[in-house]
Image (cartoon, coloured by chain):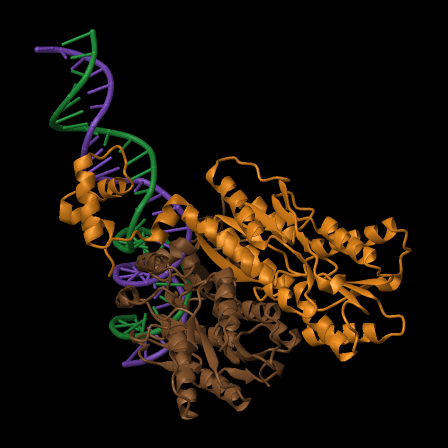
Chain colours: A orange, B brown, C green, D purple
Amino acid sequence: MSVKIKDIAKQLNLSVATISKALKDSHEISPETKQRVFELAKKLNYTPNPYASSLRKRSSKTIAVVLPEVADSFFSLAINGIESVAHDKGYHVLIYLTHESFEREEAILKEFQSGRVDGILMSVSGETCTSDHVKEVIAAGLPLVFFDRVCEDVETAKIITDDFESCYNATFHLLKAGCKKIVYLATSSSLSINNKRMAGFKQALSDKGIKKNTNDIISCTSNTEGNYKIIHELLKKKNRPDGLIASVEKLTTPIYLACADLDLSIPEKVKVISFTNLQAALILTPTLTTVTQPAFEMGKAAATVLFRSLEKVNYNLKKEITIIPSILNVRNSAS
Amino acid sequence: MSVKIKDIAKQLNLSVATISKALKDSHEISPETKQRVFELAKKLNYTPNPYASSLRKRSSKTIAVVLPEVADSFFSLAINGIESVAHDKGYHVLIYLTHESFEREEAILKEFQSGRVDGILMSVSGETCTSDHVKEVIAAGLPLVFFDRVCEDVETAKIITDDFESCYNATFHLLKAGCKKIVYLATSSSLSINNKRMAGFKQALSDKGIKKNTNDIISCTSNTEGNYKIIHELLKKKNRPDGLIASVEKLTTPIYLACADLDLSIPEKVKVISFTNLQAALILTPTLTTVTQPAFEMGKAAATVLFRSLEKVNYNLKKEITIIPSILNVRNSAS
DNA sequence: TTTATTTACGAAACCGTTTTCGGAAAAATG
DNA sequence: CATTTTTCCGAAAACGGTTTCGTAAATAAA
């Protein structure tokens, strides 16, 4: 089938050992034979078998990125960032989707004990409450770096954004704009990002001397229609909120739809800020005030940190937290 | 480090051959020893080394998906579809981005000759004009199925949507809505999808008895700001078009922006239809008439066809074209 | 009882590289 | 010239599974 080292060796009357060394420019091989080997290898279109070399070298030159889903502009951009540095480093990237299922996440991580990958980039699922599965894979010797959605009790590198501050700022912005009753639309309560954003939200309220209301935080699901109903119900009430913070991208559409259906103009009746990276924020009516996360940069940073640990021996990956700030893009939906 | 077959063999006083067979439930092994092997394997948390078995079996249980980019809702959804069936089949998926570069695409495909993957799913880059690189990889014995962006002269399975018809319909819809001068905003002229959409556009015009105008097709780039300028220029002219067809998602934002900046109301002054899967189409003002491609389904179908060829021996992948129709969602931007 | 067949397992080759170790020849050193 | 050091290469042992083939014991058939 494909050409192997042995084939080259035979044609040049050399040993496989010599070919192998020559191909990696070893000093043990004379320039002349290297030249001959290079030429024949090129001529025969030789490509080394990655599995043979992975087996022998006990390293696969591939990393895994495990994500909750990819139908979200954040993760799409993050993948771009990851792939760009992986490609530069000559690594391959395997992608795994948990579909927000903890069970699936567990199974995926368990598989990594086999040595299929040299390192892991991960954003946890919305169902993930415990972290034994990731501690286990780290204990097995695999470097793992979290990005965006992290397990806070796992001691490893994390690339996050300033969730607390950005949501604090968003809330503060709404308050300054005159909102009296703001509702934070939450995602999975087990998610670190959600809780930090929620905390920033609460802090901003209390800093402004606004007393907590049990109704000012509402949990949304992963079901688009369900979310629409929840938001519609919320805005239909007599004491409806005059400000909304969508903690995740997919809540934007139901919010705008519900406001249109209820004839509540944005921002006059309801002011809106969304955590989203959608370019379309610019062309919504009104233009959407967003908190945009540095998705590409976070992916890039996560991969960079991971490769640092893969390249250096004994590089410690513990407790290295990188924070890349999000940006509050003030537009018309919250003025 | 990790536990190997040899470890299990030693503990049970059996040979590695026996363990290997037992683990795959071979009939050569008695039920009792199978039981013992299963139990110990589970207890020791044994996970087979994928590289060892790939090397020996000459199959990797992994496929490659090579894409131009992933910052597009179409490809995000397609990845979801692909991953879902790959996961069901127990396959791993490697992702490669060409960033619309032909050179990169060539290098990526060349690498596959090494046997790293068992099959390939691919959507070609915007720069791809020749197809020798894909013919080569197919000749090397790797099944490859195209989805969405195909090389028409390569004889293999293709999953596409009805680009001609959907653009014909879109154009027809604009004409029925009263457009007199429609401009088709094109992408890479080397792309099959672009040319088919363009052909559908032209056909609709000629079917309606409208004579061709050299100015009714305008090429856009991959640069967002550049596209804005092009569209802005176009709409600033005295004889500006009264209908626009955006052949790719990323043109939507610049169109809406340019219309807003020039104070051209949609759909009164300009009617717009975009090829896009963005959910936000529902909340634009006016709501955007779209041609949505069955992205998830196409990814799923592509993967399914590929696995059919991977599982069966001598399965022929030639000239198998699957067409999954797109949907024209009529909304307010083109009424 | 003898012969044929099945059952259950092990020895060893193999997949294609990498890497260690050893050694002959050449070059450098004393 | 004798000795040491380089230079350049090959044999062979890994890496961790899979698979072929052989065989002793158990069972079935004659």
In the displayed structure image, the side of residue A46 where residue A285 appears, left or right: right
Instruction: Check the image and name the residue furthest to the front.
Output: B238
In the image, residue A71 above or below residue A14 = below
Name above or below for residue B65 compared with residue A15.
below
Residue B145 falls in which quadrant of the image? bottom left
Q: Quadrant of residue A37?
A: top left
Query: Is there any visible trace of residue A222 in the rendered image?
Result: no
**Residue B2 seen in this snapshot:** yes
Residue B333 percent across, percent down from the top left: 60, 80
The residue drawn where x is 29% and y is 41% is A24
Report the quarter where the C terminus of chain B lies: bottom right
Residue B235 in picture, x, y percent from top left: 52, 72
Q: Does residue B281 sit above or below B96 in this rendering?
A: below
Q: Position of residue B78 (x, y in %)?
A: 50, 70
Q: Relative to the observer, which residue lies in front, A225 or D26? A: A225
Asked if residue A22 lies left or right of residue A57, the reply is left
Rendered residue at 52%/51% (across/down): A113
